Image (cartoon, rainbow, N blue to C red):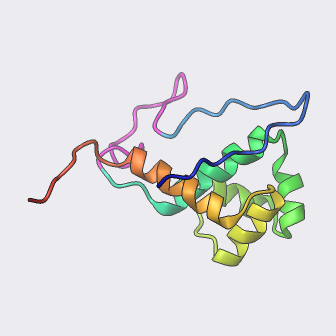
Amino acid sequence: MGEILYFPSPAAGARRREVPPRGERRAGSPPRSPDEDGRGREPLLREAYGDVLRDLRLDRGERLTDVAGRAAISPQYLSEIERGRKDASSEILAAIARSLGVTVRTLSSHATVRMARAGSSRVDLAA
């Protein structure tokens, strides 16, 4: 029924930058409205893909410029995708996935799981 998915392990000695999950405030930042921090709305697919891509990149200890260069896109565009600001085409997502050593299927699967976890905790059952 289920499939176990493995991510490549980070290279020895690779540094992982800690990024607070979406919705967590940094010290000293002003309070956000419910729409800004994702509470009270359904997560967007581009945000889930961005989170997964950033996690994969950081797990590998790579910089934006490294991954963007292999995917033949600008580091600025990759940054926008990772932050959930831009909708990437399927071709661009495939190029980024390849540059990170994963398949589009793996990328999509992890994004779907993130969306399911970020959604409402309420469960409706049909009779």
Note whether 125 is above or below 16 in the view shown: below
Q: Is residue 36 visible?
A: no
Total marks in image = 0
Q: Nearer the viewer, residue 20 or 6?
A: 6
Q: Is residue 48 left or right of residue 88?
A: left
Which residue shows up at 40% across the image and 32% down it? Answer: 31
Q: Nearer the viewer, residue 105 or 14?
A: 105
**Residue 31 magenta-highlighted:** yes
* Quadrant in which residue 67 is drawn: bottom right
**Direction top: furthest residue:** 27
Report x, y in % for residue 125: 16, 54
Which residue shows up at 54% across the image and 62% down it? Answer: 46
Q: Nearer the viewer, residue 105 or 67?
A: 105
Report x, y in % for residue 44: 45, 59
Quarter of the picture containing the C terminus is: bottom left
Report x, y in % for residue 12: 91, 30
Note whether 10 is above or below 42 in the view shown: above
Q: Main secondary structure of the magenta part?
A: loop
* Quadrant in which residue 82 is drawn: bottom right
Q: Is residue 80 visible?
A: yes
Which residue shows up at 64% across the image and 58% down it? Answer: 106
Please report the bounds of the magenta region as a residue range. 23-40
Q: Is residue 30 left or right of residue 12?
A: left
Note whether 59 is above or below 18 in the view shown: below
Which residue shows up at 76% across the image and 59% down it? Answer: 76
